């Protein structure tokens, strides 16, 4: 048995190391400051990834602006207001769990059907005389679709950290004549700040790497300019890797760019996850 | 005899179907210390928490009977438990300061009541800390974290925090049970000083403490009030055999 488990462990570590080594070797020469700050050139066979980096950053910011408040409020409802045994709490819990198991491509399709066709189409009909404005892929719909995908991550993190706020502190606040809402605002939320932060970081890390949800909802193959508004499309790191390796004019020639872009994406998500882990362990120690 | 501050009439409390307090009737006099004693699980803490409706927070709790504070039933439908708790403060077994500065801990209650004037707050904080006999120890580090204080200091800070809301009644749930003897005696001295202005009800496991600090003692046993009277009398010539057995240490 030790042989089998030992082999599995070695195999997993080996896979990770091989993956990292290959990516680092393949991408390290390409990864320069200029690569990060310049536009693609010559049919994307040369140049940098700045628009993809910028697009990913902008997308996760809009995504967080939607997912974090909404997720935190849901978590507050579940922990502070709903009775655990009530049907509504159970339904929400079930929905959150289910949401986290839905394949990401389904979110993409949902975003296309709901945000672009239904909401966007409705907006065009109501405000733009049927002229195509919002009923097409853009960074807003992509970010909102991604927000749905990362919502469970935020909800679970915030829920966990709210639960670590000791009952004694809530009672102390209530006993001083604070209302429930005052207690939440002045004791519970400050006490779960690091959980909200961890949830946000994990959501950002997840959202930065996902491709499927933005495939139909806003990611572009190539753009000569950065997005200037919410109704513009954007480039993203994950999608950039995908198109470079499948639809590029010369796949072999773009190989170094593919490796370097992958390396950037990996470093980004690794760093974000590391920060989240550090905050979480500090939180655990504090209680 | 002083005037009655709190009257309970046939007060019963159920956790689901389990009865935790069985028809408690008792009159608690104003500006005195009343000790609630009895073995663990006898209902003394539960009774204490009915007086500021802290049990409301626990799902499945049902309460019958009346609790009258200044002749006003606090379980009446129109009573706002938030306002009640401003009048009936509480100090807990485990000191529970917020992760804020000493100043902000004491200012918490006044701020909630809408006092934001810096000068007014400073005044209230200083006065409350003085009344809780901790001012001299903390006056030079009032903006440091309250979590840096010793256990005994934290508990006196919690008392100061309660006083800052200007309550009339203070409920204390074994306030010194986690403290060393020196800190305990400080808390006891404080209770003695506070009863001049406040009606104090204290739950304690410590017989000597009850005898030392209280004017009246109530002995609870399995959800029933067995005996209630002057502390001197309860500790010298109790009427009930059970009371005598408990205070002489034969059970409990």
Image (cartoon, rainbow, N blue to C red):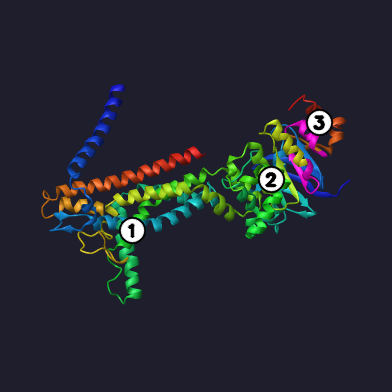
User: Whole-percent x and y of residue B53?
Assistant: 68, 49
- Where is mark 1, residue-wise? A143
The chain ID associated with circle 1 is A
Q: Are marks 3 and 2 on the same chain?
A: yes
Q: Which residue is more in the foreground, B125 or B17?
A: B125
Q: Quadrant of residue B227?
A: top right
- Where is mark 2, residue-wise? B135
Q: Residues within 10 Å of mark 1 (few under 14, many from 20)?
A: many
Task: State which mark lies toward you, 2 or 1.
Answer: 2
- Where is mark 3, residue-wise? B243
Look at the image and say whether residue B210 sits in the magenta stretch. yes
User: Whole-percent x and y of residue B18?
Assistant: 67, 39
SS assignment at label 3: helix
Q: Are marks 1 and 3 in contact (CB under 8 Å)?
A: no
Cα distance, mark 1 to mark 3? 70 Å
Q: Which residue is more in the foreground, B130 or A65?
A: B130
Q: Residue drawn at (66%, 44%), measured in percent from left and top?
A: B157
Relative to A245, does residue B184 appear above or below in the rendering? above
Q: Residue drawn at (77%, 24%), measured in percent from left and top?
A: B250
Look at the image and say whether residue A136 sits in the magenta stretch. no
Q: Is residue B221 left or right of residue A139?
A: right
Residue B163 visible in rendering: no
Cα distance, mark 3 to mark 2? 40 Å
Q: Are marks 3 and 2 in contact (CB under 8 Å)?
A: no
Q: Quadrant of residue A225?
A: bottom left
Total residue callouts: 3
Q: Residue drawn at (48%, 49%), measured in percent from left and top?
A: A193
Q: Is residue A191 left or right of residue B212?
A: left
Start-end of magenta stretch: B192-216
Query: In which quadrant is the N terminus of chain A drawn?
Result: top left
User: Whole-percent x and y of residue B69?
Assistant: 77, 52
Q: Residues within 10 Å of mark 3 (few under 14, many from 20)?
A: many
């Amino acid at each position: 048995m030790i042989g089998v488990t030992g082999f599995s462990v070695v195999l997993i570590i080996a896979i990770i190391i091989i993956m990292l080594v290959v990516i680092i070797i393949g991408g390290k020469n390409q990864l320069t400051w200029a690569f990060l700050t310049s536009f693609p050139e010559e049919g994307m066979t040369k140049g940098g990834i700045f628009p993809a980096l910028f697009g990913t950053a902008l997308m996760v910011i809009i995504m967080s602006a939607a997912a974090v408040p909404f997720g935190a409020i849901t978590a507050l409802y579940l922990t502070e207001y709903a009775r655990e045994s009530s049907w509504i709490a159970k339904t929400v819990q079930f929905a959150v769990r289910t949401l986290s198991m839905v394949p990401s491509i389904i979110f993409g399709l949902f975003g296309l059907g709901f945000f672009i066709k239904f909401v966007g189409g409705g907006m065009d009909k109501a405000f733009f005389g049927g002229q195509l404005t919002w009923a097409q892929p853009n960074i807003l719909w992509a970010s909102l679709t991604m927000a749905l995908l990362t919502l469970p991550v935020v909800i679970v993190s915030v829920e966990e950290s709210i639960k670590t706020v000791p009952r004694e502190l809530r009672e102390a606040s209530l006993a001083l004549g604070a209302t429930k809402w005052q207690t939440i605002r002045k004791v519970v939320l400050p006490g779960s700040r690091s959980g909200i932060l961890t949830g946000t970081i994990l959501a950002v890390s997840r959202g930065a790497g996902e491709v499927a949800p933005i495939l139909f909802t806003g990611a572009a193959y190539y753009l000569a300019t950065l997005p200037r508004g919410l109704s513009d499309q954007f480039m993203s790191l994950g999608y950039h890797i995908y198109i470079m390796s499948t639809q590029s004019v010369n796949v072999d020639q773009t190989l170094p760019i593919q490796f370097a872009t992958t390396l950037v994406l990996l470093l980004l998500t690794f760093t974000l996850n590391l920060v989240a882990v550090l905050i979480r362990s500090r939180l655990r120690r504090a209680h | 005899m002083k005037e009655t501050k709190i009257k309970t009439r046939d007060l019963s409390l159920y956790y689901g179907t389990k009865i935790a307090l069985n028809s408690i009737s008792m009159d608690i006099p104003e500006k005195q210390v009343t000790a609630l004693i009895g073995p663990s699980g006898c209902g003394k803490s539960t009774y204490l928490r009915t007086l500021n409706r802290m049990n409301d927070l626990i799902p499945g709790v049902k309460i019958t009977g009346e609790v009258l504070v200044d002749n006003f039933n606090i379980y009446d439908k129109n009573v706002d438990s938030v306002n009640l708790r401003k009048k009936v403060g509480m100090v807990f077994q485990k000191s529970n300061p917020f992760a804020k500065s000493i100043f902000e801990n004491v200012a918490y209650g006044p701020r909630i009541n809408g006092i934001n004037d810096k000068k007014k707050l400073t005044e209230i904080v200083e006065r409350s800390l003085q009344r809780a006999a901790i001012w001299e120890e903390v006056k030079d580090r009032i903006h440091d974290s309250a979590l840096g204080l010793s256990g005994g200091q934290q508990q006196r800070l919690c008392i100061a925090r309660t006083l800052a809301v200007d309550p009339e009644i203070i409920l204390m749930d074994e306030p010194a049970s986690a403290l060393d003897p020196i800190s305990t005696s400080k808390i006891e001295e404080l209770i003695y000083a506070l009863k001049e202005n406040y009606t104090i009800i204290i739950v304690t496991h410590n017989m000597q403490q009850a005898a030392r600090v209280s004017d009246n003692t109530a002995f609870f046993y399995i959800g029933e009030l067995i005996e209630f009277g002057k502390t001197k009398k309860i500790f010298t010539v109790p009427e009930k055999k059970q009371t005598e057995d408990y205070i002489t240490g034969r059970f409990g």
